[in-house]
Amino acid sequence: MTQDLGIAAFSLRGKIAVVTGGMGQLGRQFTLALASSGARVAVLDVRTDAEFIAARYGDRALAGDLLFCQVDVTDRTSLEAGLERIEQAWGTPDVLVNNAGLDSPPNAPAEENGPFETYPTASLDRVLDVNLKGVVLCCQVFGGAMAAAGRGSIINISSIYGLVSPDQRLYTYRAESGAPFYKPVAYSVSKSGLLNLTRYLATYWAGKGVRVNTLTFGGVFNHQDETFLRNYASRVPLGRMAREDEYNGAVIFLASDASSYMTGANLVLDGGWTAW
Ligand SMILES: NC(=O)c1ccc[n+]([C@@H]2O[C@H](COP(=O)([O-])OP(=O)(O)OC[C@H]3O[C@@H](n4cnc5c(N)ncnc54)[C@H](O)[C@@H]3O)[C@@H](O)[C@H]2O)c1
């Protein structure tokens, strides 16, 4: 007798997925992971010209299961045009990964990473626009289409800095080089806002067959400077940053029927950051 191991529940064969920010470091990973599980994937980003697609995806872009759409998540008209293109090519999406996001990287202009008291209002607007309003708009446009179709899974990408405060001690070494660095407030408040957007929509759309969950990540290795990497590692029980492919399994889980009884939840992959 063969035992059913339940692997089939993870299949995305026949599904249509949308990944916002799909040209970025993690968006590219999620796109390729979803496609390798059988989905056709629409890659949405502000820049999707041929040269950039070739640089990010190479020949993989030509296989026919990826569709690149230039979309600004802060602009509802642009999102509606993206949906129309996807529906004409393939049909109504089954999966939405709200991954597009803005952060202030360690090399951002000084005022972006200065003290809370003088954090620029323009930066607050810019980050909240993409990280929070952009996700609401994507849920309205793509989630609305899913609800009308009576099925779907939405995955909102958050961060440990949306669950707990950034540990500013990680960055104090930057003051020694004359440029004090604070992880800014806009990123944290925008990412924590996603937690309750998830709960709001999970209950709002439960009767329509659309599941909504948050996926919370810890930091990903991306050639950060040595002192930062050492400080970060000492703060994580698993002793290192994540590899960029280590969140793919969770995305497939949440996108697929393997998570069919999960909605309104927050799945945390952080190497244990929030465990102590
Ligand atoms: N990298 C990490 O360490 C980390 C940790 C926790 C959470 N996250 C989250 O994961 C997600 C992806 O992060 P990443 O590191 O791959 O970032 P990234 O900067 O490499 O990619 C983000 C992508 O979003 C796109 N984007 C920005 N504004 C947009 C807009 N208005 N419309 C459409 N697309 C837009 C960018 O062009 C970019 O391609 C983000 O939401 C981020 O907050 C990342």
Image: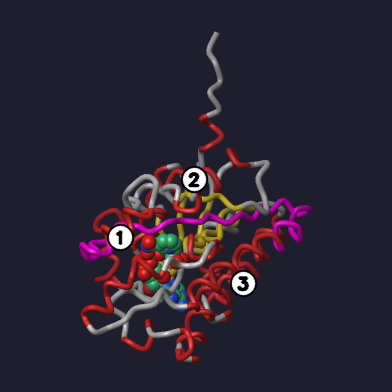
Q: Nearer the viewer, residue 208 or 88?
A: 208
26 relative to 73, above or below: above
Which-is-in-front pick, marks 1 and 2? 1
Q: Which residue is labeled 1 in the image?
A: 231
Measuring 56% from the left and 20% from the top, which residue is drawn there?
Answer: 4
112 relative to 3, above or below: below
* Beta carbon of the mark 1 residue lies under 8 A of ligand 1: no
Q: At which x and y percent is residue 139? A: 62, 67
Which of marks 2 and 1 precedes in the sequence? 1
Q: Nearer the viewer, residue 143 or 112?
A: 112
Q: Which residue is labeled 3 in the image?
A: 136
Looking at the rendered structure, the secondary structure element under dot 3 is helix
Which of marks 3 and 2 precedes in the sequence? 3
Looking at the rendered structure, the secondary structure element under dot 2 is helix
Q: Is residue 91 left or right of residue 48?
A: right
Instruction: Tell me the crowding category of disc 2: few under 14, some 14 to 19, or many 20 or more residues within 10 angstroms, Cα based.
Output: many
Give the magenta range.
200-228
Q: Which residue is labeled 2 in the image?
A: 252
Q: Is residue 15 left or right of residue 210?
A: left
- Amino acid tagged 1: Asn
Measuring 62% from the left and 72% from the top, which residue is drawn there?
Answer: 136
Measure the alpha-carbon separation of dots 1 and 3: 34 Å
Measuring 72% from the left and 53% from the top, which residue is drawn there?
Answer: 150
- Amino acid tagged 3: Val
* Beta carbon of the mark 2 residue lies under 8 A of ligand 1: no
- Amino acid tagged 2: Ile
Q: At which x and y percent is residue 267? A: 55, 49
Q: At which x and y percent is residue 111? A: 36, 89
Measure the alpha-carbon separation of dots 1 and 2: 31 Å
Measure the alpha-carbon separation of dots 2 and 3: 22 Å
